[in-house]
Amino acid sequence: MAAAAATPARTSKRTSSVLLKILMAGTGILLVLFLFAHMIGNLKIFFGEETFDHYGHWLRTIGSPALPDEWFLWIQRGGLTLAIVAHIVAATILARRARAARPVRYAHRPKVQAGYAARTMRWGGVIVLLFIVYHILDLTTLTLNPNAESGKPYANIVADFAPGRWYVTLFYAISIIAVGLHLRHGIWSAARTLGQQTARGQRIGQGIALLLSLVLVVGYLAVPFAVLTGLVD
Amino acid sequence: MDIQVRVWRQSDSSDKGRMVTYDVKDISPDASFLEMLDVLNEKLILDGADPVAFDHDCREGICGMCSMVIDGVAHGPQRATTTCQLHMRHFKDGDVIDVEPWRAAAFPVIKDLVVDRSAFDRIIQAGGYITAPTGAAPEAHATPVPKKDADLAFEAATCIACGACVAACPNGSSMLFTAAKVAHLGLMPQGQPERDTRVIDMLQAQDDAGFGGCTNMGECAEVCPKGIPLNLIGRLNSDYRKALRNSAR
């Protein structure tokens, strides 16, 4: 019986899964920092049209006069794109490895005890990516925006989330909740990947991740719902 | 008590395998899960059928040989308990119990419920040891170890390398196993000289064996019969990062 089917040892060296996870943690943190800056900017909409449009214009002049107009924005866009691509590439490699690591599935498999957020990291990430694409076409390039007036972000947003376009608001809300769930597990998971190693730290870390995700979800949903309810018009 | 078991039958590594249902009658609630399978096997042998192959050795919860996924849970429903220490009183008369082998590419099925766990041996061979002269055991207090470190190292050292963590992990990852071994040796003064190479080499062996990566789901710690804490994985990650930094110097 000991005719053990010797496990074929892989000859090629794999890139370390922990290294890939460190890359995901680092790029993830960068993206979360951007999300907070973006959210704070969004909330300026509550200070009125002039303030908000002025803020939008200021974004184009960051670094002036050392940098020509919009250079900072393009550097930031380049950095964020790089971070997103690296995050997705590492996630794809790890997801494919995970799939290959269990070729035969269990006949009887109860639901895993981990929370919904942890279980939906991969598909949730895909939803977030689709949202990013739509969001850029909607409010950056204005391709899909009903108002599409360059330099008038306030009017564009008000037109975007008008009550008649409830489906846009719904998709936006679902996507933001997907971001929140992704970060609820992601923020803590990043801390663990970077070496968080006590049981107490785990409880604190998970609490902080939940809090930060909630702040982001509420902050991002405030704008479309303010437009929808006529608080911002 | 009378129960039904649906057991994974696979004649060898090339067989596709299937779940087969057997009636097991008149089982004492005080029988262990493995004793229940012994009763089934005796009946199968008397009937001239092939008995169900399963791994077992000490039957007292310390060797790490028994390895069954019972109703979808590695080592069955009782927490912090190996299959051999699980008793039938945790089931009800008339229950239908599913029994499957560890499912992982790195643990190919040899026969029925027996899997080849030599991938774990390769991880240990890569660095799960301390290079030291062998011989008589040294005097216990010759090298002082802080109590806190000794306790944590002992907790990590209770890992019996059964592989339940891999069986339960949605990613088929062996991080909890590797983390336990790295923590156990890395907390000891004797483990310091090889601390950096150990973590890098063991993780490389783990990745090369075809285990998945960790996504911090925590399934492993839920099923671990020795209660290895999940946070040791954070310690492994931290050790790995420091080792990379030191090797870049």
Image (tube, coloured by chain):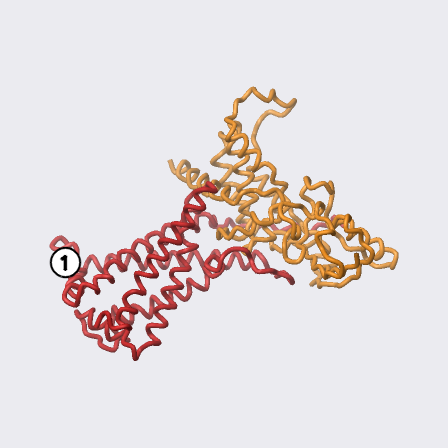
Chain colours: A red, B orange
- Please, which chain is the residue tagged with disc 1 on? A
Q: Dot 1 corresponds to which residue?
A: A68
How many labels, in total?
1
Residue nearest the observer in this picture, B43 or B207? B43
Q: Circle 1 sits in a helix, a strand or a loop, which is it?
A: loop
For the point 36% across and 64% down, the residue is A176
At which x and y percent is residue B56?
A: 73, 46
Question: Which quadrant, please, contains the C terminus of chain A?
Answer: bottom left
Horizontal placement of B235 versus A109: left or right? left
Q: Quadrant of residue A128?
A: bottom left
- Indicate the position of residue B228 as horizontal and vertical percent values: 57, 42
Type of the residue with mark 1? Pro
Compared with A207, A124 (above or below) is below
Question: Is B28 placed above or below B127 here?
Answer: below
Picture residue at 33% right of the left edge, 61% below the top:
A218
- Is residue A148 shown above or below A24? below
